Amino acid sequence: MVPRKKSNLTGAVAAVDGKVLNKRIATNPTQLLQGRMPGLRVTQGSGEAGNENVNLQVRGLGSYGASSAPLVIVDGIPGSLENLNPQAIENITVLKDAASAAIYGARAANGVILVTTKQGKAGKTQLSYDYNVGITKASALPDLVYNSVDYMNLYNQANKNSGVTNPNASFSQEMIDAYKNATDKKLYPDFNWLDAVFRTVPVQTHNLSLSGGAGGTNYNVILGYVNQPDIMIGTSFKKYNLQLNLGSKINERISFGSSITLNYGDRKYPRNGSEDQFLSTISQSPLYGPVLPDGSGRYTSRAYPFQSPNKNPVAVAENAFTRLNNYFMQGNIFLNVKILDGLDWKTSGGLTYGFTKNYTNKPVINQYMWFAKPDDLPARQLDVGGQGLEVTDDNNVYPVGYTQLTYDKSFGNHNMKVLAGTQAEYNKTQKLFGSRLQFPNNDLLELDGGGAGQQSNNGVTNEWSLRSYYGRLNYDYKGKYLLEGNARYDASSRFPENRKWAFFPSISGGWKVSDETFYGPKLKTVVNELKLRASIGTLGNQNIGNYPYQIVYNSSFAYPFDETLQQGARQVAMANDRIKWESTKVLDFGVDFGLWNNKLTASFDWYNKVTSDILSASTAFPSYIGLTAPTVNYGELRNRGIELGLQYRDKIGEVSLTLNGNIQANRNKVMKYGAERISGNTIIREGLPYGSFYLLENTGIFRSKEEVEASPVQQIPAQPGYLKFADVNGDKVVDNNDRIVVPGAYPDFDYSFNATAVWKNFDFTAFFFGSQGQKIFVSEWGIVPFRQGGTFTRDWMDAWTPENPNASLPIVGAENTPAANNVRTASTFFLKDGSFLRLKNIQVGYSIPQSTLSKAGISGLRIYFAADNLVTFSKFPGLDPERGVSSSGGATSGRYVTHPQNKVFAFGASITF
């Protein structure tokens, strides 16, 4: 589907050029979209190499049942952004409303992201090479106390506060003095576990491209390589990428072309993932290091028997890992025939193939007490979820084909374009799993190396398909009255026979007010362009998994029969043969205008987006039935919002200046849900934003016994130093009935600002991204002292004690005691302001003058310095306020520890011959 000029668009569309995207250096192109287009919210959940967990949302959370991910189209067929080389991207367009996205029907309910890769151009062959090396470190790490004496004293204080009287559960004065007066800091250390696990690493990217064309044929080839060691030990990522685009004009009426993406990724990470690795790191005390001080290389469990830390993260990083090899290919070929003047026929076929091999190594690793003698037995074995070797093969085949006719004709002042086509797609995924438990050593990483006595295997295949018919009609009169209609008729194999098909129409209109005769010349000198837009339409969603309308039997059950166990099967889930498509209706009003000869251009949109017949598991399903709840069409979710994009271009003397700004605000509300659902510290209730915070209200700290006695009875019997919670319903007892809904699960608005200046051969770019009004729940590991034996942040040095009754933080308690459980109560105490403004990127470049380069046969050479995640302005006390809303929408809950984002200082060069 050929993109049209923005001046002729009637739908809500945003676009960004590949040159703008690549002003920022990133190995994953989805990161580059952040803040670039109003209506598209990009949150990065992690800085882990090869697993950045980037979440894309177009105009808010589209559904809480089916997937809310937007549909990504690469060169005309559904594809993947993550597997693309950023340097291969020509431009990206986001279709936000029903009018622009309805032509894509199925899976377009959550918006569509169109990606066009670079094509070759006729003329001289150009060879280009881009090189970048970045020095990478954590953008932020918690400020933890690693002074052993401070740790031991507060640990003892926590035991005292909790009434722990067992002397063998606390540090004796002799132990404390050994660390306090130590002359051998190797034996009695103040060990910093963050320094042991996190590091500064170099990251390199290389891109070699060849483009050109002659005789009606053009080509563009880009070969890319990324070497990305992670800032966390035991984690790394390498990626190899090839993009090949070819186009050829056979004659005046026939042309064809192809686009091929090949990608290979090699990712290694600790067996339980980076988040678990981080949790394990901050669950260690400073009293010991990762390996014993005797030089034996044996791994440490803990220093003293009463300590109970998590897994030794260095032992995990060096031994227990997952190796993920990913092979990806996406290719398509098209044929375009000009049947008559104005009538074109285009046919395209594409194939996406992905293959992933996953090795998970869970070796036997012994851990010893810190002061262990050479002949001492291990204190315990490292637990990474069992032992042995697991190997998984996943492959996915996804062919897509479409054919369409386009008729484009003008009749005087009337211009018309009609498009009609059909599309078919099929997806097949296969998985094969095998494992063996016992191996003679930890170096054998093939299944045949393990004993066959304890082995297991399984495999599964999933298939689904879509068939579609679509059409579009564009009409304009004198180019100023614009009308567009779209329709798509989709059938999905995921629905029952009589409900497979669904119809998704849209209509939109536009009026170029500035082209009217009444639009006076004086006004036109100020507001030289003005266009009004409106659209309404319906989109569909079928991403619910495979065939929930069918009764499925699981055959992995054994039944006693004739005194032996026989293979059997049983139903595990309820089926619903009346499910149908989930649908989203979008109403949009927009205005585009340009001021002062388009020095300042702007686009504003207001939208109302309602998703109904939401596909999700039944919310009111009794557990005593013994089966998983069926998928039903029930529920309604509304998103309303505004979007504003601004651009200012001018030249001040010899400086060319471009300023871009975006702001977007979205409000979602659950319109229909059924019985409310409370999960942890969140609630889903009609009339509220989906996944709102639902917490006890913290009103301070009990400072004295008198204050305790004068207050309502608390959930955990109160003591001085405990957190105090409000009795909201006034029954003199604080319990779960006193929880309140707290706003802040979603931001009030997101915004970004980009400035580019060019002076002679110098160029400068600065990009800011921010969010305002979101609250983030921060608790558990890294926040609450002594969680699984870990240390604490420095601010807990000012915790309540009888000698310090006016402390800023409550009493510290021993793990799993009332004092600790009081602090860990889900309340507004841990709800923090997540507003931030971050300088995401700056780049300064210099292009060598052509007069200097021509002598060496070089047509272009640019060198640059760039910095990413340079500084963050925020009151947020946790690691990263940018993590924001969880990928499933709603408030984040529980622990708030994840792989930190990366701060990068990079140098690079781009040379063209």
Image (cartoon, rainbow, N blue to C red):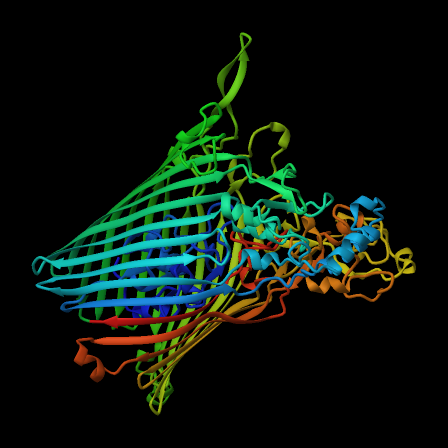
Horizontal side of residue 208 vs 49, given as left or right:
left
Horizontal side of residue 702 vs 577, given as left or right:
right
- How far from the left and from the top, in percent, is residue 9? 32, 67
Position of residue 161 relative to residue 434, above or below, is: below
Position of residue 249 relative to residue 162, above or below, is: below
Horizontal side of residue 513 vs 679, given as left or right:
left
Query: Is any part of residue 536 visible from this angle?
Result: no
Of all residues, the one furthest to the top in this rendering is: 562
Residue closest to the eye, 637 or 223: 223
Of all residues, the one furthest to the bottom in this rendering is: 653
Residue at the image point whose x is 78% and y is 57% from the top? 177
Residue at the image point whose x is 43% and y is 34% from the top? 547
Quadrant in the picture for residue 253 = bottom left
Residue at the image point whose x is 58% and y is 44% from the top? 298
Query: Is any part of residue 670 visible from this angle?
Result: yes
Position of residue 527 relative to residue 579, above or below, is: below
Residue closest to the eye, 472 or 241: 241
- How far from the left and from the top, in percent, is residue 600? 39, 81
Position of residue 402 relative to residue 703, above or below, is: above
- How far from the left and from the top, in percent, is residue 288? 65, 52
Q: Quadrant of the N terminus?
A: bottom left
